[in-house]
Image (tube, rainbow, N blue to C red):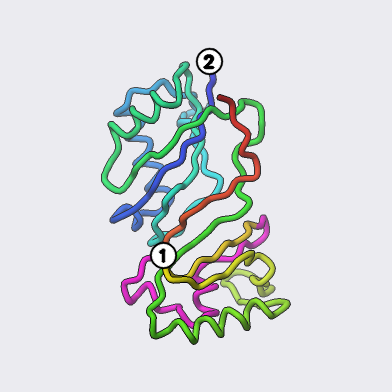
Amino acid sequence: MIRQRMRIRFGKQDDLRWIGHRDLLRVLERLLRRARLKLSMTEGFHPKPRLSFPLALAVGISADEEVMELELAEAMEPDQLLEVLNEHTVPGLTFHSVEKAVIGEKKAQVESVVFEIPVPVADQPRVRAAIADFLAAESHLVEREKRVEPVDIRRDVMRLELGDEGLEMQLRTARDASVRPREVLAVLGLAELEYDGYLLRRSTVNLTNEKVTP
């Protein structure tokens, strides 16, 4: 039986950013059915396509290059699969690249992610001062619902910069409690920025195991 794992990069933008992860899965499953691809399916009473995401995206955030892995039950070249996916896609969902991943190796795991958001010019001096204070601190604890202990978000903020294009933050993912981009915005006094119409987007997903075959 043929099993071929493909690593796919795609963008989730426009109105599609308002759907949650489960709804995205349903959109993708319908897309795969329309494309008539031969898929490797899970076992049990309700088989599903072997489709996995290393890191879900919160509602309201757009994405430039999300990652998913799909197992096919047929031989197909990456360029061919990319063409088929884009032929049957929906508005707001664009597939950028496909690579053959190695069957038997661990699935894609995320090391860090980059988020970007514009910042009004009038707020930039204050935000620069808040960035300097945050980066100088050894820790910064935040409270979360359903957690007894506060979370130290400082340890996982790898980079925090304000440039001409706006705020850019690189955040390390952690198994216990990864820092959330909106928590960083709140620390910098920018919690209301999205309500004012500024778009938060995840521009980059960096993986720990990028090994692929030609």
Mark 1 element type: loop
- 154 vs 14, left or right, is right
Asked if residue 99 lies in the magenta stretch, the reply is no
**Which residue is located at x 49 percent, y 70 percent?**
182
Residue pictured at 46% horizontal, 41% vertical? 9
On whether residue 195 falls in the magenta region, the answer is yes
Check disc 2 and report the residue beneath it.
2
Q: Residue furthest top?
A: 1
Distance of label 1 from label 2 (alpha carbons): 40 Å
Viewer-nearest residue: 212 or 180: 212
Residue 210 place in picture, x, y as percent:
61, 38
Q: Nearer the viewer, mark 1 or mark 2?
A: 1
Q: Amino acid at mark 1?
A: Leu
SS at mark 2? Answer: loop
Magenta residues (range)? 174-200
Q: Which residue in the structure is indicated by mark 1? A: 200
Q: How many labels were placed on the picture?
A: 2
Q: Is residue 134 above or below residue 168?
A: below
Characterize the magenta stretch by its predominant secondary structure. loop
